[in-house]
Image (tube, rainbow, N blue to C red):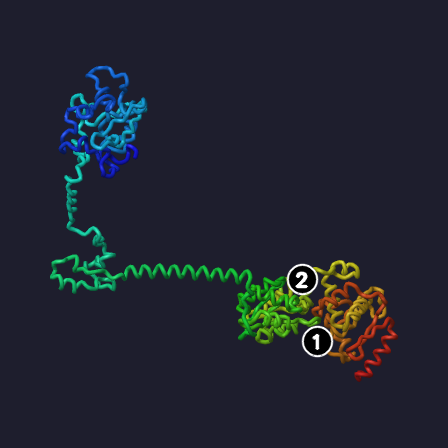
Amino acid sequence: MTEYGRGPGSEPWHPEDPLYGDQGWGGQQAAHGQAQYDSQNQYDSRNQYGDGANQYGAQQQYPQGQYDPYQQQPHDPYAQQHQQQDPYSQHQDPYAQQQYQQQAYGQQQPQDPYGGQPQQPQHGYDTGWDTGQQAMPPYEGQPAATYGYGETNDYYGTPEAYPPPQPPGRREAAPAPAPEPTPDWDPDEPPEETHPFFTGVDEKDGRKAPRDDDYDDEDEDDRDSGGSGERRGKGKKKKGRSGCACLGVSLVLIAGVGGAGYFGYSFYQDKFGPAPDYSGSGSGSVEVEIPKGAYGYAIGNILKKAGVVKSVDAFVSAQSENPKGKSIQAGVYLLHSEMSASEAVKMMVDPKSQNLLVIPEGYRNAAVYALVDNRLKLKKGTTQEVAKTKSGELGLPGWASKNKDIKDPLEGFLYPAAYPLTKETKPEAILKKMVERSNEEYKKLDLTGTAKKYKLDGPWQVLTVASLVQAEGLTHDDFRKMAEVVYNRLKPNNTITNRKLEFDSAFNYLKKQSKIKIGSSEIRTNPDPYNTYYHAGLPPGPISNPGDEALRATLSPTGDGWMFFISLDGKKTQFTKTAAEHEKLNEKFKEQHGLQ
């Protein structure tokens, strides 16, 4: 065992008492509170047993004040450490250096006269090494005494020191610890809440309203305790408030998890799932207008807002799958509410589903006005009156003629096409759309250049020629030949007709009719400016609304020298270059229709 181990006795080493287990010499202990060595050099008087038996008595005792050649300044190598860790280490061991010197020079260890065992160091913290540091001064200014010289330190005299060890037979049981003071309140019980939120007291009138989480056994405990146990009488609280809090937290967590799941599912559906779509052909009637230039996603957005389809992606997918899907054009469509995207595409490619006002090529304005009144369910003549009073507000081009003989300023400007029409459409709105469309189409044609080429008075007269070609011709080939007939008859050197066109269509226009059988006396005597049998040159203005083919034929007529034309059955037009050829056909026509 090291010097930090057990002493000569059988007691274990106490980890916090450096002197625990020291039974002194001869088994005698000093009384508690008395100095251990009591100013006697007990060690010297009991352990001097001959030469070499104990170096402390025979060889190491020097008179007071005599120089010891081996004496060094006593030092505790753990002094600094024990100063921080052991507040009771106030003494010094004067024998530590001597013991080290004897061990260093090979001296014999002192023997224990009672056990024959080598004497162990008596201080558990002193190793006997000299590190060259100064010894720790004792507390409270007590002098450090050495054995055999004057007073010695009382290592058990301070109140803070451990009591001296007792022999096994004389030991007393440790006194029982004093009972801890008991407070007059229970520290484990939470303090009583006084805030109205917890007590339920109404701040306005000071009354406590009954609640579900009030004490449920207050009355019973009060009766049992007789009012003596004030705190016991209050009983235990129900856990209603805690339960509500837990329920609220649970609901929040469930809502959070549910919301995260919903958004996750929606994200998956948007990225990887099929586009949302209705099923079936829907119900009801929905009127949808598709503007010009709208395609794919733009049409899908319009249909979704109108409640026709459920999603834009579903419509775009259905449109791409339908072979005719790309043919959907601008217009107004009559569809159903909440119908599948495929059914919506199928209806939109069917012309019957379009709510359009279709203006045929060659229609006169009077016929167009009647169509608008009929579709908008207006009184007969309403649209015509609007055209007459608001013609200057509908967007006619600047080159439009202001001739007073013109019967209708809008004639020739209600371009033949399909126009979307709803129940809320106004007559002026639809007329304005037609004029806008005609302006767009006429800008695509070189009307001004054609007028100069054929010596006409501007685009207005080119449009008038196109209206005549449209009214008289039956096919595209007829249109080009008919245009050549007009230009040839308008030539100043035309001595056959003397620049008279002699078109029945112009006479029918002024008569607001469409007849084939017209008597010669009637047609040649009517002085109306639109009667080309009576007046040379072109009529004051167009007599119909020409279509694209008639317009382009007017710009590019044939050059074969055609001068005359006639249709015997109204299905086929025959053209001739001389008056004699034309007269033969004319006689045949009169014979067939009984016009002799």
Q: Nearer the viewer, mark 1 or mark 2?
A: 2
Closer-to-camera residue (393/307): 307
| Mark 1 neighbour class, 10 Å CA radius: few under 14, some 14 to 19, many 20 or more | few
Label drawn at residue 90? none
Identity, as a three-letter code, of the amino acid under mark 2: Asn
Q: Does residue 120 appear in the picture of this structure?
A: no
Q: Residue at x 22, y 62 (%)?
A: 214
The amino acid type of the residue labelled 1 equals Lys
In which quadrant of the rendered image does the N terminus lie? top left
Image-based side of 416 in relation to 576, left or right: left
Residue 3: x, y in percent? 28, 32
136, 7: nearer the viewer: 7
Residue at 31% x, 61% y is: 244
Which element carries disc 2, helix, strand or loop? helix
Residue found farthest to the front: 50
Please tell me whether residue 18 is drawn above or below residue 475 in the rendered image: above
Q: Quadrant of residue 415?
A: bottom right
Q: Is residue 12 above or below residue 279?
A: above
* Res 26 → quadrant: top left
Residue 471 relative to residue 498: left or right: left
Q: Which residue is mark 2?
A: 439
- Say which residue label 1 marks: 511
Q: In this view, which residue lies farthest toward the top?
A: 66
Mark 1–mark 2 Cα distance, whole angstroms, equals 28 Å
Residue 232 seen: yes
Chain-order first, disc 1 or disc 2? 2
Question: Contact (CB < 8 A) between labels 1 and 2?
Answer: no
Where in the figure is residue 343, as x and y percent of width and height?
59, 72
Secondary element type, mark 1:
helix
Horizontally, residue 111 falls left or right of residue 395, namely left
Q: Residue at x 23, y 21 (%)?
A: 51
